[in-house]
Amino acid sequence: MGKNRSLPFTILLNSSSSTVVAVVVVVEVVVVVVVIVVVVVVVVLVVIVVVVVVVVVVVVVVVVVVL
């Protein structure tokens, strides 16, 4: 378990090429950005759904009270 986990780090340290490091950093940044975007989109969708539900409930209550 521990050996497998440290394997990528060992490969990274053994290869002194800065290209590999740059690629890894870029990949990590891209992954973080994608995760943030997904979270933001989910939050926005949840907010929209909540607002729609609240509006519908308010409209129904107003209609019931008025009628």
Image (spheres, rainbow, N blue to C red):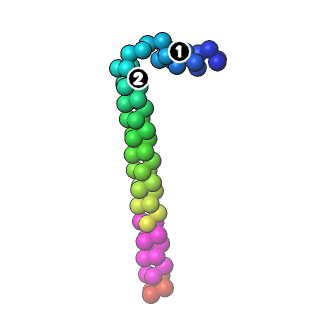
**Residue at the image point whose x is 39% and y is 46% from the top:** 37
Q: Which secondary structure class fits the magenta region best?
A: helix
15 in the magenta segment = no
Crowding near the residue tagged with mark 1, few <14, some 14–19, many ≥20 C-alpha atoms within 10 Å: few
**Residue at the image point whose x is 64% and y is 18% from the top:** 2
Residue 39 coordinates in the image, percent (x, y):
45, 47
As drawn, which residue projects farthest toward the bottom? 66
Q: Secondary structure at mark 1?
A: helix
Report the front residue among 27 and 57: 27
Q: Is residue 65 above or below residue 55?
A: below
Q: Which residues are magenta?
A: 52-63
Query: Is residue 34 visible in this depiction of the protein?
Result: yes
Residue 52 coordinates in the image, percent (x, y):
42, 65
Residue on which disc 2 sits:
21
Q: Is residue 27 above or below residue 34?
A: above
Residue 46 coordinates in the image, percent (x, y):
46, 56
Task: Identify the image quadrant of the N terminus.
Answer: top right
Task: Identify the image quadrant of the C terminus.
Answer: bottom left
Residue 10, numbered label: 1
**Residue at the image point whose x is 39% and y is 41% from the top:** 33
Q: Earlier in the sequence, mark 2 or mark 1?
A: 1
**Contact (CB < 8 A) between labels 2 and 1?**
no
Q: Secondary structure at mark 2?
A: helix
Q: Amino acid at mark 2?
A: Val
Crowding near the residue tagged with mark 2, few <14, some 14–19, many ≥20 C-alpha atoms within 10 Å: some
Report the front residue among 58 and 10: 10
Report the front residue among 30 and 16: 16
Q: Amino acid at mark 1?
A: Thr
In this rendering, the count of numbered labels is 2
Report the front residue among 16 and 49: 16
Q: Is residue 67 above or below residue 31?
A: below
